[in-house]
Image: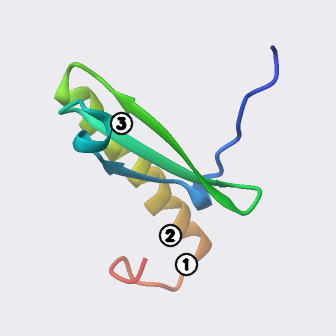
């Protein structure tokens, strides 16, 4: 298929570490909204640094999105 299975908008995207749910010490849960319901993608990597880099990249992108969306808000409020 040439179409994406899902489109995850950064405004509705979040990432949390979930090693117990995934059964892997380097597990990450990515949540997003689709059709007004929360969907989950679970990912892991054998290298812990790699999954931390993914987490930081997702959270940094979301933080930047919120800074642009709310330019008058302080970083603490964002």
Left or right of residue 29: residue 69: right
Q: Answer yes or no: do the residues labelled 3 and 2 have beta carbons within 8 Å?
A: no
Q: Nearer the viewer, mark 3 or mark 2?
A: 3
Number of numbered discs on residues: 3
Image coordinates for residue 1, horizontal then vertical, percent: 81, 14
- Quick one: label 3 or label 1, which is nearer the N terminus? 3
Residue shown at the point (47%, 51%) measured from the top left: 61
Q: Answer yes or no: do the residues labelled 2 and 1 have beta carbons within 8 Å?
A: yes
Mark 2 lies on residue: 67
Q: Is residue 47 above or below residue 62?
A: above
Label 3: few (<14), some (14–19) or many (≥20) C-alpha neighbours in 10 Å: some
Question: Residue lying farthest top?
Answer: 1
Could you give the CA–CA distance between mark 2 and mark 1, rounded to whole angstroms? 5 Å
Label 2: few (<14), some (14–19) or many (≥20) C-alpha neighbours in 10 Å: some
Q: What secondary structure is marked by label 2?
A: helix
Image coordinates for residue 60, horizontal then vertical, percent: 40, 53
Image coordinates for residue 4, horizontal then vertical, percent: 74, 27
Mark 3 lies on residue: 54
- Quick one: label 3 or label 2, which is nearer the N terminus? 3
Residue shown at the point (58%, 53%) measured from the top left: 32
Residue shown at the point (59%, 59%) measured from the top left: 12
Disc number for residue 27 = none
Q: What secondary structure is marked by label 1?
A: loop
Q: Is residue 8 above or below residue 43?
A: below
Q: Is residue 25 above or below residue 47?
A: below
Could you give the CA–CA distance between mark 3 and mark 1, rounded to whole angstroms? 25 Å
Disc number for residue 71 = 1
Image coordinates for residue 53, horizontal then vertical, percent: 29, 36
């Amino acid at each position: 298929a040439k179409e994406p299975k899902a489109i995850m908008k950064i405004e509705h995207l979040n990432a949390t570490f979930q090693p117990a749910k995934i059964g892997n010490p380097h597990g990450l849960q990515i949540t997003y909204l689709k059709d007004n319901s929360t969907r989950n993608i679970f990912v892991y990597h054998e290298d812990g640094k790699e999954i931390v880099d993914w987490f930081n990249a997702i959270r940094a992108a979301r933080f930047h999105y919120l800074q642009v969306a709310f330019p008058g808000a302080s970083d603490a409020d964002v």
